[in-house]
Each structure stands twice: as structure tokens, then as C-alpha cells.
Image: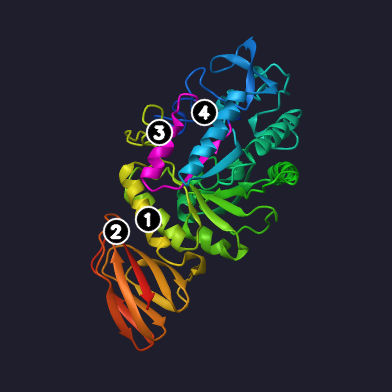
């Protein structure tokens, strides 16, 4: 969206052709520099002069990444036309769009490219004390420009029903509060590192109270504006990496976003009765099997969204066939595997399915995740090296069991089972690293 050189029509065509139904866009208030985060082809790092933002360019040269500075008193009609067209084309392809208003700035180099940085506009925005102040209520006159942008975008997209809003991407990165360590043994081994836990990927961090207060203000702007408009859209809030039990949720927030989420992010928050989203993948190598397993495990633990960073899409490779030069996954093969997952789940009456952590079933020899329509159907994902054994307490009836290879799509013939009721024992075929089971009562 924010990269003028990116051909979004070809991109959306490729998503639809591969059976994908979801994408996420940033507004342009933030962009990255080439090579940031080790990404070789980064659509968030436009070439000089190619950044599109909600604001028009002025007549004054001097924007940090080429072209004139921004005039925050005027909206860019080309930007809003592109946004409207993007949403329209996505809707025609049954693609849902997550529109993320803000993000952490992470480091001074990224903040130096923001249109709201005082060096990049002609409107005299305040020189805040470091980029970490940007997503707080103590950011001087930046707050008024943030509010104006949110309200303008909310008005501009209101006619579209295929989107929801995210307040901010990874708010804990700039406003950090440590709440958990994933691996205490690793933290001890890395105890001489400056950060407790040794590294960000061993830490569970959430946003500070100052950040949460600012995020509530952003929600105020969205809901106040939409109260005067025909449509009201869902709002997502990004809580942490990996997962953590969220204690307090703004009642106006409907979607809980987690990055690099473990299945327990869904289990621990299922009682909140919101959509639970695995909102970003990556930083775990490039193997399809890694991200396929993450998707299956999270969704069968009760998650509602899986959104993977796909580094096969970039300028010049909008068809998603480009070589991956980044610390994450993506590509046609992974998308086909995710399509299999979507088809598997939607073959059930999904609105009746709920996760279960071995209250009426157990597994021997693998990790397992299960959704069930009580007494009628079970969807099971197994991860490990089989064979394994499943034991399920099911009512009497004729059950149909079908095994699915999540990588290839190969599936067994439906096996009818005359079950008298009580414990049903199923021995899996050999597998590795994963296997799925569809079990339905006739």
C-alpha cells in the first residue's frame, strides 16, 4: 500500500489464485530502510521517492528518502484513491484486509523516515525525546496529526466491509514491559547479556501503561468517527509475541493479535470470547514445515486467524514467485499447504467447533491439537514422528475417519467405524512431521 512501486493488483490476483483470503497493510506513517531486520526485498522499504503516505508532498525538498517534504495540512488524493482501489479489488477476490494505523518505530533510523518526523514535514512537528515517545500521549503536537490521520482514514474506508482496523503493530517494542521468560534455562545461560532473558526471542513483553493509554485514545478516535458513519468495523489490538494471558481488554476491541504465537496464546485467551489471531510469522528460518505447523497448531488450539509474512512477494515479484531472502518463510508451496488447512477446517461446521485440551481424549506418541463439535465431529492435528495412538471418548454411531497429509494433500479413503460408544482407539499411519485427522459422525 505505502510503496508506490508495488503492483498490488498482481499481488491480490496471486493471493486469490492460491486460495488465500487475508492481507495486512500499513498506512505509511512508518517505513523501513533497506536491509532492516535482515530482509533482502522489503516492501516496507520503498526506494527513494516511492513512499506513499496519507499526506501530500509540499513544494519544499528534503524528505529523508527522496522527494519533497510532506505537508501535514493536506491529504494526498492519490494515496486515498490507491487505498480505495486496493480495498475494492480485495473485496472482489474475497480477501479481508487488516489496516494497521501505527507501529513501533524500533530505532532512530526508521523514525528518521517517518513523515511525522520534524525534519520530514513543513508543519513544525515537535522534536520528541526519542522515537519511543511517538506512541504515547506525551508526544507533543504529533498527537493532533495522529488523530487527524486516523479520523480521515476511518471516513475514507467506511464503505468497505472487508476490513478491520489494528491500532498499532508491536507496541511493546518501543514501550516495553517484561512479563515472562520463555526458557529460564536459556536466560540463565545468557545471564551476562544486557537484557533479562538474553534476547527478545526469549522474552514475552507487553506494552507499558503509557502505551495502553495512547492506544485507548486511538480507539476513541475510531469509534467516535464511526458512530457518525453507516458501518462499524472490528478493532484489533496487538498484545505480545508468543502469547500471554491477557487480563484487561478494552471492550471495544474484538480481535486479540499475537506475533510468532504458540498454541497456548489461543488456549490461555479462549475464554475472552474474542477472535484470536496469529498476526505475524517469521524469524524461524524459511522451512515451509515450520510455518505450516505453526498455522495448524494455532488454529486447532482455537485461533481464528493465521497471517504469515510471505517474503516471496516484493517489488518486481508481486506474483509471489520471488526467491526468499529474509529471516522468514513464504512461497507458492507454503501457500498451497495453507490452502489445504483452510479447506480442511471449512469442511466442518466451524462455527460449532471448539478446542479441547484432552478432557475426553488423549494421545500417545505425538503432540496433538483438537477442535470438536461435541458428539458430531473432531478435527485433529498431530505433530511429531508417528505412528501415534489416539483415544477418544465418543458417543455410539457410525464415524468416518479420514487421514490427511498436511504437506502434500494426500488423504486416505474415509474409513467407516461402527462405534458402540465409549473409548475409540485409533492407531495412526506412520507420519512425520505431521498428520491431520477428520472424524465425523454420520
Residue 384 at x, y = what percent?
A: 31, 62
Q: CA distance from mark 3 to mark 4?
A: 23 Å
Mark 3 touches mark 1? (CB < 8 Å): no
Earlier-in-chain disc, 2 versus 1: 1
Residue to which mark 4 is pinned: 32
Residue to which mark 3 is pinned: 10
Residue to which mark 2 is pinned: 433
Q: Secondary structure at mark 3?
A: helix
Answer with the quarter of the image where residue 314 lies. top left
Q: Residues within 10 Å of mark 4 (few under 14, many from 20)?
A: many
Q: Is residue 329 left or right of residue 3?
A: left
Residue to which mark 1 is pinned: 293
User: Residue placed farthest to the bottom in the image?
Assistant: 420
Magenta extent? 3-27
Q: Is residue 177 left or right of residue 312?
A: right
Q: Secondary structure at mark 1?
A: helix
Mark 1 touches mark 4? (CB < 8 Å): no
Number of residue marks:
4
What residue is at 40 percent from the left and 33 percent from the top? 10
Q: CA distance from mark 2 to mark 4?
A: 36 Å
Amino acid at each position: 500500500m505505502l510503496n508506490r512501486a508495488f503492483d498490488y493488483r498482481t499481488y491480490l490476483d496471486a493471493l486469490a489464485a492460491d486460495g488465500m483470503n487475508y492481507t495486512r497493510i500499513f498506512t505509511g506513517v512508518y517505513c523501513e530502510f533497506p536491509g532492516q531486520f535482515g530482509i533482502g526485498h522489503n516492501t516496507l522499504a520503498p526506494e527513494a521517492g516511492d513512499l506513499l503516505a496519507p499526506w501530500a508532498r509540499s513544494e519544499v525538498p528534503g524528505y529523508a528518502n527522496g522527494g519533497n517534504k510532506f505537508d501535514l495540512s493536506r491529504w494526498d488524493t492519490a494515496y486515498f484513491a490507491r487505498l480505495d482501489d486496493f480495498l475494492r479489488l480485495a473485496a472482489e477476490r474475497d480477501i479481508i484486509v487488516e489496516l494497521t494505523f501505527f507501529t513501533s518505530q524500533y530505532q532512530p533510523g526508521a523514525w528518521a523516515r517517518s513523515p511525522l518526523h520534524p525534519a520530514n514535514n513543513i508543519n513544525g512537528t515537535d522534536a520528541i525525546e526519542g522515537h519511543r515517545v511517538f506512541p504515547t500521549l506525551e508526544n507533543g503536537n504529533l498527537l493532533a496529526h495522529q488523530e487527524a490521520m486516523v479520523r480521515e482514514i476511518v471516513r475514507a474506508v467506511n464503505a468497505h466491509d472487508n476490513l478491520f482496523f489494528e491500532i498499532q503493530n508491536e507496541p511493546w517494542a518501543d514501550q516495553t514491559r517484561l512479563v515472562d521468560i520463555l526458557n529460564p534455562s536459556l536466560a540463565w545461560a545468557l545471564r551476562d547479556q544486557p537484557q533479562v532473558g538474553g534476547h527478545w526471542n526469549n522474552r514475552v513483553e507487553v506494552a507499558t501503561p503509557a502505551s495502553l493509554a495512547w492506544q485507548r485514545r486511538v480507539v476513541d478516535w475510531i469509534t467516535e468517527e464511526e458512530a457518525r458513519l453507516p458501518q462499524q468495523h472490528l478493532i484489533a489490538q496487538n498484545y505480545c509475541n508468543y502469547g500471554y494471558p491477557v487480563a484487561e481488554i478494552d471492550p471495544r476491541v474484538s480481535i486479540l493479535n499475537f506475533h510468532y504465537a504458540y498454541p497456548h496464546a489461543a488456549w490461555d485467551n479462549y475464554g475472552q470470547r474474542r477472535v484470536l489471531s496469529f498476526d505475524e510469522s517469521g524469524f524461524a528460518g524459511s522451512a515451509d514445515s515450520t510455518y505450516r505447523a505453526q498455522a495448524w497448531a494455532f488454529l486447532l488450539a482455537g485461533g481464528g486467524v493465521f497471517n504469515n509474512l510471505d517474503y516471496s512477494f516484493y517489488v518486481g515479484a508481486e506474483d509471489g514467485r520471488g526467491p526468499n531472502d529474509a529471516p522468514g518463510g513464504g512461497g507458492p508451496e507454503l501457500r498451497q499447504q495453507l490452502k489445504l488447512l483452510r479447506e480442511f477446517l471449512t469442511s466442518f461446521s466451524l462455527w460449532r467447533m471448539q478446542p479441547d485440551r484432552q478432557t475426553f481424549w488423549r494421545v500417545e506418541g505425538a503432540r496433538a491439537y483438537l477442535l470438536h463439535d461435541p458428539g458430531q465431529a473432531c478435527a485433529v492435528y498431530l505433530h511429531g514422528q508417528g505412528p501415534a495412538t489416539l483415544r477418544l471418548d465418543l458417543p455410539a454411531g457410525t464415524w468416518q475417519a479420514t487421514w490427511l497429509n498436511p504437506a502434500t494433500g494426500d488423504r486416505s479413503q474415509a474409513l467407516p467405524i461402527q462405534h458402540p460408544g465409549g473409548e475409540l482407539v485409533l492407531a495412526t499411519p506412520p507420519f512425520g512431521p505431521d498428520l491431520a485427522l477428520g472424524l465425523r459422525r454420520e
